[in-house]
Amino acid sequence: AIEEAILLKEKTGGTVTVFSLGGEDSNESLRKCLAMGADDALRLSDPAFAGGDGFATAKVLAEAVRTKPYDLILTGTQAEDDGYGQVGVVMAEMLGIPHVSIVNRVEVQDKKIKAHRELEGGLEEVVEVDLPALLTIQTGINEPRYVSIMGIRKVAKKEIKALGTSDLNLKPEEVGLAGSNIQLEKIFVPPVGEGAAMIEGKPEEIAQKVFDILKDKGGVA
């Protein structure tokens, strides 16, 4: 999404502002975005933001976006940890703007966007929406540019402002775990099943062994 935003900036002008919800460890990623070509970066950080579901996270991001003028919002398709794919589309609803999800190509035409998106079965859909709009960007839409050490050094001292609940006119009970509709109970790696068994012998012997295994497991009568 970051690379696509910068490519659009290079083609059409404008500025790119990057938002990240997280602690100070997010600064490294934000500085990388600045080194890639983003103009500004804001970190959304407050103890009240912790434990939020997609709805609560979208609320924080939507309020942060409202602090800046915008024409187009680009997000990822889904987070790496939960994979719900909710935040972008919920943000669009909260902001009252159209959205297109799972986008793999973007065309800008005056005050409109043509977004190409993946469908099941290898099909592709082209959707035209008016700006302002929000797009969730599919992995593989582009190849992110290389960020040099010199580029990182140039932005090393650039201030990254942190915004909390009071800066966004939010109440602690509206965000994070307190403002979530879903509470995660547990994330775990399921137990690994038994490995594959290699069956050797003549075809009729292999067939009999497979039959016996299935019978033992209740697969055949």
Image (tube, helix red, strand yellow):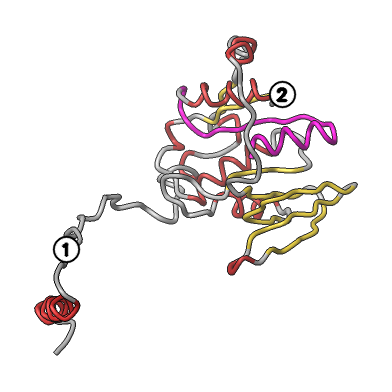
| Quarter placement of the C terminus | bottom left
| Quarter placement of the N terminus | top right
For label 2, the SS is loop
Q: 26 and 164: which one is in front? A: 26
| Figure check: 217 above or below 136 | below
Work out how far the residue at label 1 is from the one at label 2, CA to CA, in angstroms: 57 Å
In this picture, which residue range is highlighted in magenta? Answer: 1-24
Direction from residue 114 to residue 163 in the image, left or right: left
Residue at the front extreme, as displayed: 202
Residue at the right extreme, as displayed: 110
- The residue that appears at 58% across and 13% down in the rendered structure is 149
* Image x and y of residue 130, in percent: 82, 54
Q: Amino acid at mark 2?
A: Asp
Q: 207 and 195: which one is in front? A: 207
Please identify the quarter of the rendering in which residue 163 is found. top right
Q: Amino acid at mark 1?
A: Ala
* Image x and y of residue 151, in percent: 64, 15
Q: Earlier in the sequence, mark 1 or mark 2?
A: 2
For label 1, the SS is loop
- Which residue in the protein does label 2 denote? 39
- The residue that appears at 62% across and 65% down in the rendered structure is 122
